[in-house]
Amino acid sequence: MARKPKDTTRGTRTAERMFDSRAFADGVFNDEYILVVGSSVVLDPQQFPHSGGDINQYIIDEINNDRRQERAGFIDHRNFTDVFRGTPLDEADPIYTLLSDGYEYSLSDISPELTQLLRTRLFRFVLTTTIDSYVETLMRDIWGDELRIVNIADNLSLKDFQDALARCRVNKYTQPTLFYVFGKVIEGRPKPRGFVETDVDAIKVIEKWMMEVDTKHIVPFLKEKRMIALGCKFDNWYFRFFWYILTRGFNDADREGSKDLDGNLLTSDNLATMFDPDNPADRQLKDYLQRRGVCMHDDVWQFMRHIYALLTSTDDNSPLRQMVLEKRRQGGIFISYKSRDVLAANELFCKLARERGLNVWFDNTSLQGGDEYENTIHTAIRQAKVFIPILSPSIAEDLRKEGEVIGTFYSREWRWAAENKELVVLPVAIEGYDLRSPVNQVFEKLVGHKPSGIDMTHRPLDKFSPEKVGYAKLLESIMKHLGLPEA
């Protein structure tokens, strides 16, 4: 009997997945996503046009340039793992030499898209496939000493991470963490290798992920999360294998859904951006990932800008405006103001939320009073850590007529703030309000104590702008009480 020809369409059909922006934002706001940062989105492509923003390509170019100066005719390799094949064992490691010998990791070198995305503080856990310290430099600037560093090549950091997960239960771990999944260049530790450089190194790291990484805490923690991979070089086979390790059996028992042609459960919980859609290897992997139900995007830079806008915009035309507002209102900073002072409140909100990326409740909508509205604000004040009442000349007039203050909504917010004994009150005086005047004692009576106020008025103060001095003092106090690194 003649054999039937193989079905050649079976291997080419893919399961297309649409990006669900609302489900994605909801998952991010609920701390369900891990950000996987690849080499291709680290550097600012405007400053590093030849490498296109790819730190690995930049390293290759720098080493190639050095070697060209040493010997003519050196071949310009384009694959990161191929650059050093044939290098004599006794020759100094060029990657280690470049990245550890006085190399400066400047925040200004990092791509604006990656910077603004991480500064939202919505991605507390980041995996990086790079071996340099750029992502770490940025995350340390955001999280300070709170940041935990985990390195696949460092057993001590793995053990510390495992213990931390065990103490707090896997699904309750919230400490900001950066995990070097392929190792890191560490000064003073060039050999044995602490990072993936060749295919042999990659095999050793994959073996460690499979055989040595704790499977009771670390792997379950990673697998219970959703992943979004940005700018990862998919032509590296070890990244494909790493992705497979983390997604294999990804909560299959708890999910319902259709299966692809290979019998794998389809899920849109994972997202990946393709940095080079013209690369044949990328196109092949795109087909594979789509078979796994992974949502794909071709333009990583456009996608990063898109999701940043989704997660932060409160413009009227933003499809997730209400969701973003609700997120901002949970904890963090509460700005209390009289409706007449909305411009001053909005200016302060822009400085704290948009420029500094802080979590700020600011309601400038035209909502009417009512039980539901009042309960929402009361709850927000109970959840806040810092309460900022804006004190203005208009409020000073109300305070002089103490009886008229009783019926104002902003004074009700002050009383709710007084109920929260753990809440830090930082009153801000704008032009026309004197913190030393007798009327300020009425304010202190309503909030239940004598908080130290921040003077934002325009009275002369040496050679400095008093507004800048006042704002700097306010920001310093906020960062201190929120447990964040100083601005």
Image (cartoon, helix red, strand yellow):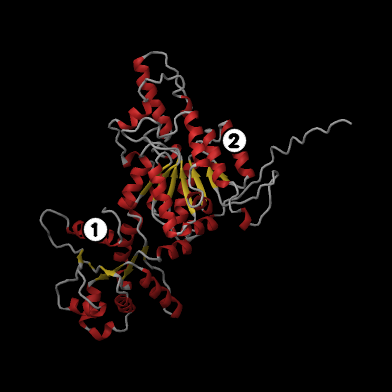
Q: Which mark is residue 476?
A: 1
Note whether residue 62 is visible.
no
**Residue 175, how many percent across, how many down?**
39, 55
**Residue sticking out furthest to the right:** 1
**Residue 181, how many percent across, how many down?**
45, 41
| In-image side of 478 versus 265 (left or right) | left
The amino acid type of the residue labelled 2 equals: Arg
Residue at 12 percent of width and 60 percent of height: 460
The amino acid type of the residue labelled 1 equals: Glu
**Residue 187, how many percent across, how many down?**
31, 34
Mark 1 burial class by Cα count in 10 Å: few <14, some 14-19, many 20+: some
**Residue sticking out furthest to the top:** 72
Do callouts 1 and 2 mark residues in contact (Cβ within 8 Å)? no
Quarter holding the N terminus? Answer: top right
**Residue sticking out furthest to the bottom:** 403
Tag 1 secondary structure: helix
**Residue 438, how many percent across, how many down?**
15, 78
Q: Which residue in the structure is indicated by mark 2? A: 283
Q: Nearer the viewer, residue 409 or 89?
A: 89
| In-image side of 249 versus 222 (left or right) | right
Residue at 12 percent of width and 59 percent of height: 461
Note whether residue 471 is visible.
yes
| Spatial separation of the CA atoms under disc 1 and disc 2 | 49 Å
Q: Classify residue 190 by image quadrant.
A: top left
Residue 83, above or below 275 = above
Residue 59, above or below 327 = above
| In-image side of 228 versus 2 (left or right) | left
Mark 2 burial class by Cα count in 10 Å: few <14, some 14-19, many 20+: some
Q: Nearer the viewer, residue 347 or 65?
A: 65
Residue at 34 percent of width and 36 percent of height: 186
Tag 2 secondary structure: helix
